[in-house]
Image: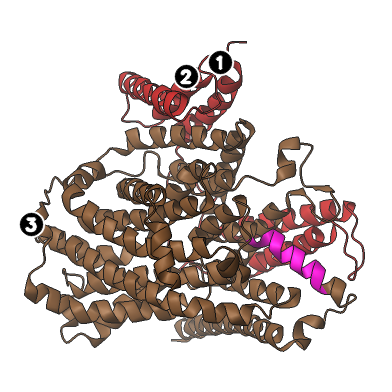
Amino acid sequence: MDLWFGFGVALEPHNLMWSFFGVLVGNLIGVLPGMGPISAISMLLPLTYTLHPVAAILMLAGIFYGSQYGGAIGAILLNLPCHPPHAVTCLDGYPMTLKGKGGTALGITMIASFFAASFGILVMIFASPLLVKVAFKFGPAEIFSIMLLGLLAGGTMARGSPLKGVAMTVVGLLVGVVGTDVNTGVMRFTFGFAELSDRVDLAALALGLFGVAEFLRSVNRLHVVGSGMKVRMRDMRPSKAELKQAFFPTLRGTLIGTLFGAMPGTGPTITTFIAYAFERKISKTPERFGQGALEGVAAPEAANHSKTQVDFIPTMSLGIPGDPIMALILGALMIQGIQPGPQLISEHADLFWGLIASFWIGNVLLLVLNVPLIGLWVKLLQVPYRYLYPAALFFIAVGVYSTNNSLFEVGEVLVFGLIGALFAALDFPAAPILLGYVLGPMVEENFRRALLLSRGDLLVFVQRPISASFIAASALLVLAQLFFALRAALRKREAAARLAGG
Amino acid sequence: MPGLINQRNRDYYGGGLMLLSGVAAAIQGARYQIGTLSRMGPGFFPMALGVILALIGLAIMVTARSSVPAEEKRPLPPEWRGWIAIVLSLIAFVVLGSYGGLLPASFAVVFISALGDRQNSVKSALILALAIAAVSVVVFWWALQVQFPLFNWG
């Protein structure tokens, strides 16, 4: 069957090697303080350009879950959430470390992640082909509408103000416009730079927004306190009672993650918070949460992993990434010349099934790697930031240079770093920019094509039933946001009036 | 610039920035051919995006007034030393990359940015920069064979 074919692809020595390399390096970078999956993937992105598409995507996926697991180590042992979804893991993971149960927390995290990822992979195997069947009926109007929904969801459901999120999405779309217009050959927003005629570089954009901007924000402000604790291999093996205790929370977390993974735009951070809150709600002893409850580690980590796994479904089968990390992976595919969308599974069966099989293999590799290497990771956690960011800047500069052998892209990194730092200071989320940038050209292309076919009739988007339902969902999303904003404003006014009156 | 950007006026500045960028994009977009709905020119999409961005920026400014900060975060003091060092280090990489080669550029980016951290001394920055420069030669020049001459004076 297809899946066996996929295992064949993923187990080819060449592909297996890159997958292993991705997991290892991703884990290593993810452990380092202040480095999340986005920085890990974008730093290694240039390296994948020279690889075969299958090897490239396997490696990127490996970096992704490797760095995700690496982030959990920092959250549990140092109370340092380098990647926002792990903020919840800190709540109970760090207290467990203080009690000397840090190793158990790591072990449970690993088991919960593996279980959740496996479940997510199963869902992916069954759901993707179904989605593709529907997606084949999509014309330009449908593709535009579903992308609109994805962009709106990605913008409004990010943390903070929905207006700001949508503003950032539009900024991303504008950044995506830079370059040569495919239909007419006109140069747009290139400001006379010939280097910009071939779009803004994906790695430069991501590394500027999430690398350099992050360093600008944390320099002299992030102080890593070495905890000096030691975690040995046998500390990581949870007891039978602990396994039993973690089983149902893992299961519930997995289901919550899967459910939210299916909704476009709901970020992993929200998902983990919901999983945690749910676990505390149904617990008989909610007072233990925050004091080092095992359930409070297992459920959110499981939710996080199943969600990211399920997120691959719309990314691969529709070409709609659910979050900036998926946008990066999608962007990498496009650089390889692979057009994501419904035709991907049939046209690039080796890539799709190879990726699915490699998820499993990669997660096994992760388990195997982390048991012996945990001591090394603990040491890496304590690398001082003052050595870390200069070295990272070097890798960013050389990595971006090597994408086109041009120093212009290094300049791009600097510019986007400054822009990203400015946006961060103004409290605008940077993640939607990446989403807008990757989807921008497809949105424009399909918008133009749909209106060309309908001879300029805008009603085409609501006359076709599938497209109309996406538009309706988008409208609902906007209305819901308006409703919540108005209600909050009203409540505030009431409270103010009460304060003034009484 | 302490106090220049704070919780209260941040949304004014942010919204204003979006408004200005939107207007600029719309004007620039309109200079490419706009065309009609059925036959859009290259200017249509950027202009539409610019208008949308300007409107959202306006909305952010208008709603900024009503949103009273829930929890006032203490504004962090500006970190000029770190900021200048990081920016200069990347500029140095670009300049030395074209007029010096990979080795000087690698050394400069690490050395200058490391000086931005208050806990780094000149000596520790120097050691770190030398170590990374060695990594640069071994990994990128020798092993990965990046097309970047080690030395390229003039």
Q: Is residue A29 magenta?
A: no
Q: State the separation of the CA atoms marked 2 and 3.
A: 45 Å
Horizontal relation, residue A238 to residue A206: left or right: left
Could you tell me if residue B65 is visible in this image?
no
Callout 2 touching callout 1 (CB < 8 Å): yes
Q: State the separation of the CA atoms marked 2 and 1.
A: 8 Å
Q: Is residue A441 magenta?
A: yes
Q: Height in image: A467 above or below A162?
A: below
- Identified at 40% across, 44% down, the residue is A218
Q: Chain of mark 1?
A: B
Image quarter hosting the C terminus of chain A: bottom left
What's the magenta region?
Answer: A439-450
Q: Farthest residue to the top: give it.
A: B154
Front one among A128 and A460: A128
Judging by the rendered image, the residue that carries numbered circle 2 is B103
Horizontal relation, residue B76 to residue A52: left or right: left
Q: Chain of mark 3?
A: A
Image quadrant in which you'd find residue A484: bottom right
Residue A187 position, x and y percent, is 81, 46
Mark sitting on residue B100: 1
Dot 3 alpha-carbon crowd within 10 angstroms: few under 14, some 14 to 19, many 20 or more: few
